[in-house]
Image: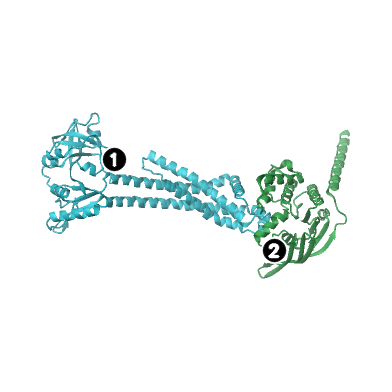
Chain colours: A cyan, B green
Amino acid sequence: MRIVATIVIAIRALRRNKMRSFLTALGIIIGVGAVITMVSIGNGAKAQVEAQVASLGNNVITVSPGSSSASGARGGQGSSNTLTVEDAVAIQREIVGAVSVSPEIRNGNQIQGNGLNWRTNISGVAPDFISIRAWSIRAGDIFTESDVRANAKVCVIGETIVRQLYADVNPLGQTLRIRNIPFRIVGVLNQKGFSYSGSDQDDIVLIPYSSFMTRVFRWRRTINNILIESSSAEAMPRIQQEVTDLLAQRREGREPDFTVRNQLELAAAATETSRTMTALLGAIAGVSLLVGGIGIMNIMLVSVTERTREIGIRLAIGAHDRDIRLQFLIEAMILSAMGGILGVSLGIGISETLSRVNGWPVLVSSQSVIIAVAFSAAVGIGFGFYPAHKAAQLDPIDALRFE
Amino acid sequence: MQPVVQLRDIRKTYRNGDLEVHAVRGISLDIHKGEFIAIMGSSGSGKSTLMNTLGCLDRPSGGTYLLDGINVSDLDRNRRADIRNHKLGFVFQGFNLLSRTSALENVELPMLYAPRRVSADEMRERAMHALEIVGLAARYDHLPNQLSGGQQQRVAIARALVNNPQVILADEPTGNLDTKTSVEVMGVFQKLNDQGITIVMVTHELDIARYCKRNLIVRDGLVVRDEPVADRSFAAEELQKVAQAEVDAKLTHDLASHSNAKD
């Protein structure tokens, strides 16, 4: 028997029961829609995390202070801070492949400018800090090495500072006071948004680390971090090891009181989290697709019973088993394919709406669309097969006699 | 000439738990081309089983069945479906048309399942021709529920005809019809038979059986009587009689009402 004729027969049968066909397909529509929406939300979150990880810089190794213990009380991370600018200089000088190195030293403080004031984070860094973190300057420029050598009173500010203090004027060239010491604004950073942990990355003032330690916070002897950019991802484990060895050597056998971590480990942990979330959301949505499939099977079984006489007629006038099986299988497949197509539109629609209304990062991947549609087609064949087989096995005499 | 249907010692036994039911106990029968046979019998006589066997819907438990020279008694399910498709035509008591499907599409149905591919144009042409034979070409696009019982049965006959079968099998074709419509349907069968088509039908109405040429009576799984119809009815004559009777009745009625009006 011809496939085209079977398809026509199947479509005609589905059209006879439009409402029922729609409700049957609804299970698949919701299932596919849910899969696509959930995976899109998960992917969106993953992409955002990846973007944030990227904003921390590529191939970056971070040295942070370790912990100390006194009389058995362990102080937690940073309690033993022995990292110094000299350590950073030593790393820059001795480690091959450490392309750029920047100390980072932080303090929160009130600042004044343009007749307003604001509490923010002051970071003392080297000019390379911006390139290591893969940040960029929107206006003006970063201060220079000679500014660092001269303990210059210059600063680069983030977008939040612009909004809070210089909303109505061009901040470049303006004076910003930190602990009453005037700093000239030489650059404005591009906006970066919130970090993975939720802090505002734009609420920041960067000044030369030398100025930080000699002019503003003169009591600070140690620094918060050393950031190292490696020449390549492959060189990172080696550099990590060499930095550890170098710092241990500089501490002359004392307990190592620092940790050396690389950005990749951090990134891996963060993406792993969002990947798990995506898989979980997808699995939950997958269950609804399965339920939709069972709905199709249920309706197909009802349909087979209801149309027993029709099947009897077809068998009596010469239909083979496979003609009947194919007819019902095609019906189930059309139902689920229709559900799949409508479900994709629904899923994309919901994803778009969510991203517009809630501002969620949503990423509809063609991969999730293909998987959802393929899965729904498989559901159609899988759950359509039993009813179709049942129909094909009917005895023509019994089927014709069926009331 | 070789008979179209040749049954030799056909038996059919149903097993109902421990009980064996012998529905057909050894029927031998020859049906030649151009015959018009009525099989009669009370319910439980085995006539339905005989009919299902003739229709290749059921396999006999014993004996051989040659249809058009082919031994169909031991064919498998799908081969029997093919035989039903191009050697047999079925007409049922309940018409058994596909609902919400036009007359034309109902008649096209057997060609959809034909082992040989039939083009859409040829399918339509042959279906229209079959509808013309039964006098329903004008209503080809009507749905079954838009047709009267007699018209539905004529569509079913057209469907049985469309693959040019060796034998048309009709299972109580007039069972659901009133007397006049029954005569009309028998008229269609007689017309087809006059053109040389072999017809076998089951009925329990004696006056319907008299439109056939040969009557078989089945009882307890055996053919107990097999005789030609002596005083055969012809649908054309009968219909004329009915029409005349109607005219007479109308006249009497008119006269009566006329005389009533005078009083």
Instruction: From the image, tell me which residue sits under label 1.
Output: A193
The x, y position of residue B141, in whole percent, is 69, 42
Tell which of A307 and A229 is nearer to you: A229
Mark 2 burial class by Cα count in 10 Å: few <14, some 14-19, many 20+ = many
Q: Chain of mark 1?
A: A
Q: Which part of the image, by quadrant, shows the N terminus of chain B?
A: bottom right
Q: Chain of mark 2?
A: B
User: Is A29 positioned to the left or the right of B210 in the image?
Assistant: left
The x, y position of residue A397, in whole percent, is 68, 58
Residue at x 28% of width, y 42% of height:
A194
Q: Secondary structure at mark 2?
A: loop
Residue at x 69% of width, y 61% of height:
B58
Q: Which part of the image, by quadrant, shows the C terminus of chain B?
A: top right
How many numbered circles does the render carry?
2
Q: Amino acid at mark 2?
A: Arg
Mark 2 vs mark 1: tell me if same chain. Answer: no
User: Is B164 positioned to the left or the right of A101 in the image?
Assistant: right
Task: Give the numbered dot on residue B59.
Answer: 2
Q: Amino acid at mark 1?
A: Gly
Disc 2 to disc 1, how far (Cα)?
A: 80 Å
The reply to whether residue B169 is in sight is: no
Q: Secondary structure at mark 1?
A: loop
The x, y position of residue A237, in whole percent, is 24, 54
User: Is B125 positioned to the left or the right of B187 in the image?
Assistant: left
The x, y position of residue A219, in whole percent, is 10, 44
Query: Which residue in the rendered view is the most extreme toward the front?
Result: A96
Q: In the rendered image, which quarter is residue A256 located in? A: bottom left
Q: In the rendered image, which quarter is residue B142 located in? A: top right
Tell which of A42 and A3 is nearer to you: A3
Mark 1 burial class by Cα count in 10 Å: few <14, some 14-19, many 20+ = some
